Structures are given as structure tokens and as C-alpha cells.
Image (spheres, grey):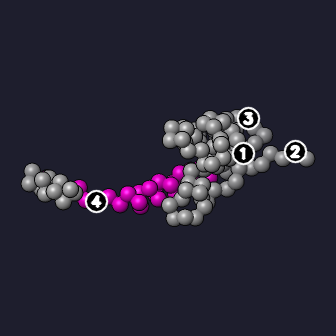
């Protein structure tokens, strides 16, 4: 079918689009999301409510995507919520295409002594 489409487009006088390496594009997107999440989490101060809110806002698109697709990273986290693996779990955790766990730092724990 792809060859027939390319032939048709060529016959119309247009250049056929080259094949897109979707796997590479997905891997590049995953890496960018992990880097973004890591940088955002690096700025998190658990004791500062404004910092927590800012991190939740910056990572909200990831939670929203997970809510729409029914994926929550296996943690049971909810969209917009803050669980131990909620927004800070980061995309690609256990789902990175190269089979390696995400280079995602664990969210700071809030242990009281």
C-alpha cells in the first residue's frame, strides 16, 4: 500500500514523504520528558507548598496523559494528585523503549524523625 501511495503521489508531481523512523522519534521524546521531569524534580522542596504546587503544575501534562490513556505508572497515582509515585514518577518508568529504567531520580522522601 505504501508503494502504491508513493507512486500515486509521484504521478501527481509531488515528492512522496520519506519514511519516518517512529521508534527513534518516540525514544527521543521519552528522553526529553525524562530530562524535563528530572530537572523539575531537582527544584522540588517538599517543605515549601509553593514549590510542591509548581512541580505539580509543571508535571500535570504527564498526569493528564496518563489519566486519558489509563496509565498511571503502576503506582495507583491519580491525575493531579501527589502520591509517592504520582507526578514525580516520571514518564518512561518501566516503559523506556531501550529496556532500561528511566534515569529518573526518586522523589525526595518526607520522613519525619
Residue 33 percent location from the top left of the image: 53, 51
| In the depicted structure, whether residue 44 falls above or below residue 100 | above
Question: How dense is the environment of label 3, judged by Cα within 10 Å: few (below 14), some, or many (20 and up)?
Answer: few
- Mark 3 secondary-structure assignment: helix
Residue 42 percent location from the top left of the image: 67, 51
- Tag 3 or tag 1, which sits nearer the N-term? 3
- Tag 4 or tag 1, which sits nearer the N-term? 4
Residue at (41% x, 60% y) in the render: 23
- Tag 2 or tag 3, which sits nearer the N-term? 3
Nearer to me, 107 or 55: 107
Can residue 61 be seen at all in this image of the molecule?
no
Residue at (54% x, 41% y) in the render: 70
Q: What separation in Å lies between label 3 and label 2 (alpha carbons)?
A: 17 Å
* In this rendering, the label closer to the viewer, 1 or 2: 1
Q: Which residue is mark 1?
A: 84
Q: Which residue is mark 4?
A: 19
- Mark 4 secondary-structure assignment: loop
Question: How dense is the environment of label 4, judged by Cα within 10 Å: few (below 14), some, or many (20 and up)?
Answer: few
Q: Which residue is mark 3?
A: 49
Residue at (25% x, 59% y) in the render: 18
Q: Which residue is mark 2?
A: 112
- Tag 4 or tag 3, which sits nearer the N-term? 4
Report if residue 21 lies within the magenta region.
Answer: yes
Quadrant in the rendering for residue 50: top right
Quadrant in the rendering for residue 104: bottom right
Label the magenta part by its dominant secondary structure: helix
Residue segment shown in magenta = 14-39
- Tag 4 or tag 2, which sits nearer the N-term? 4
Amino acid at each position: 500500500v505504501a508503494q502504491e501511495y508513493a507512486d500515486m503521489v509521484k504521478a501527481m508531481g509531488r515528492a512522496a514523504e520519506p519514511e519516518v523512523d517512529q521508534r527513534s522519534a518516540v525514544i527521543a521524546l521519552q528522553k526529553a520528558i525524562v530530562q524535563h521531569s528530572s530537572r523539575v524534580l531537582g527544584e522540588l522542596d517538599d517543605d515549601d507548598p509553593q514549590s510542591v504546587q509548581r512541580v505539580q503544575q509543571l508535571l500535570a501534562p504527564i498526569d493528564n496523559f496518563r489519566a486519558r490513556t489509563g496509565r498511571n505508572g503502576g503506582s495507583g497515582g491519580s491525575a493531579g494528585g501527589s502520591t509517592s509515585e504520582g507526578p514525580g514518577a516520571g514518564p518512561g518508568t518501566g516503559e523506556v523503549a531501550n529496556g532500561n529504567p528511566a534515569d529518573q531520580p526518586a522523589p525526595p522522601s518526607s520522613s519525619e524523625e
